Amino acid sequence: MDRSKSIAIIGGGISGLSTAFYLLKNAVKHGKPIRKVFILETQSRFGGWLQTSSNPNDENDFFELGPRTISTNSYGGVNAIALVHDIGLAERVRYISKGAANFNKRFVAIDGKLFQLPSKFYDLFPYRQPFKPFISYLVKDFLMPPMKIETNEDVSVDRFFRYRFGNDVADYLVNPLCIGITGGDSKALSMKSMFPNVLRKEQTHGSVVKGMFTKEDIHRDLIDHPLVRKSIDQKWAVFSLEHGIETLTKQLCSYLEKNYPNIIELLPNSELVELSFDTDKTIDLTYLSNANDEKSTHLQVDHVFSSIPAFKLANVLKEKYDLLRTSLLSIDTVHMGVVSLEYDQNLLSDKFNGFGFLVPSSEKSSILGVTFDSCIFPNGKPGTKLTVMLGGYRFLELFGQPDSVSKSELLKESIKAIRNYLHIQRPPTQNMVTIHQNCIPQYTLGHEQRIATIETEIAHLPLSIVGSSYHGFSVPECILNARIQVNKWLNKLD
Ligand SMILES: Cc1cc2nc3c(=O)[nH]c(=O)nc-3n(C[C@H](O)[C@H](O)[C@H](O)COP(=O)(O)OP(=O)(O)OC[C@H]3O[C@@H](n4cnc5c(N)ncnc54)[C@H](O)[C@@H]3O)c2cc1C
């Protein structure tokens, strides 16, 4: 009897491609035979939000339209370093080390001006409006008892930090931080799901500051991995790759096709439209493929890994999975405008030679923040490259439906913000405006409970879920979650 398995992965972003990588690598290691792995991807390209738009005449000159840095400060980050090495990208890493100014110099916009956040010990003491000396916030946290939270209770990010550090930190630091990482509202986001480690440390050690002094082993089983060792020696804080971050997903595709030519089948232009589990064992996938004149094509497999956003998975399931569909649909997302600007001169003074700035809600601005790309990972001709992010949780209120937003309005708003905050008066020499619909999931209050319901509902189905909707949306978290879900499934096989 043939006991080998055929698998379909839905979605070819970083989560889907990492799932294929771990499936094939770990199945061989554990002696579990895999017959076929199909990756269905709607678009003509793989990579999802990892999207680098290169100058067609020079691949060293590009704009990042999605993520631009991968953080190394967690086990997920360390795991991402190991994956980068294992697929042959070790020599193509670009990194910023922990002490570097372009990593540490960050700003928040307050009353139209940019305020530099403390990055060194002696920055904790001066009195600079609108903040008190930062040391006073740390003392407050040190003296406060842990927040009282019942086992099933969730608390918003805003409420937690307001309680521990006071209003200035909640309004001018935590609010823009949430905007910067999710485009979301700190009053709506769940502390348990957004910052589980901070909450755990506070509940265990009685204060966030005390918790920060407890050493956490983020390297674990990967401590002796050659590129991880190098990253420790060179003190990597964040990294990217030569020719931009999309090099990662491009290389994952080449690696899979080169190493598993008879098993892996990449199916671009293939949109899953229905997923049905009618019989106990086989799964029927219906997808539209332009290789087949957009006619529906069927595929039968033994197991499915879905890496598409939760709401898209809900849309391909049948109505009988009502509770599962409702729970998937309750994971909200935000839209974002991404405006890339290039100037042919170096217009950022030394003062601003840093990572970028974030804009708190109190500024009543349409922009969420700006990254100083030509300072972070310079590329292309000498000059200045900036990326402005707009919208987020206020996208609909500010700009209306993403399908009908005028790109020139987003460009105008971005240039105005650059003029106001960075005093750059001249127009950019190049620009690119993209509108990313439903691009970042929102882990709002109750997220953990929603995930528990989803996991109970799929426990009896031949379906695993990976991707940014569930257990972390940063690139390293997506990669790590793919590894965890693959191992969970492999361990269940007899
Ligand atoms: C603007 C922006 C900036 C970011 N910056 C950072 C950063 O600096 N650092 C960081 O770590 N993270 C960052 N992130 C977050 C991170 O990039 C994403 O969360 C992550 O890339 C999500 O990957 P994924 O594979 O889970 O999902 P996706 O990238 O969404 O991939 C899912 C894929 O499924 C396909 N698909 C959808 N429906 C179907 C269907 N029915 N059938 C077949 N295929 C389908 C899609 O086309 C897509 O390719 C950023 C995100 C955005 C949007």
Image (cartoon, rainbow, N blue to C red):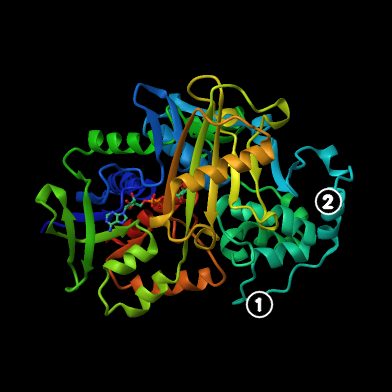
Looking at the image, residue 456 lies above or below residue 101 = below
SS under mark 2? loop
- The 10 Å Cα crowd at callout 2, few under 14, some 14 to 19, many 20 or more, is some
Distance between the alpha carbons at the discs numbered 2 and 1: 32 Å
Locate residue 48, reporting x and y percent: 36, 47
Q: State the residue at coordinates (70%, 46%).
A: 108
x, y percent for residue 32: 25, 51
Residue 283 found in image quarter: bottom left
Q: Tag 1: residue type?
A: Glu
Looking at the rendered image, the quarter that the C terminus falls into is bottom left
Crowding around mark 1 (Cα neighbors within 10 Å: few <14, some 14 to 19, many 20+) is few
Residue 339, visible in the rendered structure? yes
Which is more toward the observer, 262 or 369?
A: 369
Which is more toward the observer, 199 or 391? Answer: 391
Q: Residue at x 66, y 77 (%)?
A: 150
- The mark lying in front, picked from 2 and 1, is 2
Q: Report which quarter residue 388 is drawn in.
A: top right
Q: Nearer the viewer, residue 416 or 97?
A: 416
> Quick check: 118 left or right of 481?
right
Q: Position of residue 202 (x, y in %)?
A: 72, 61
Q: Mark 1 highlights which residue?
A: 150
The residue labelled by disc 2 is 131
On the image, the x and y values in percent for residue 396 come to: 49, 62
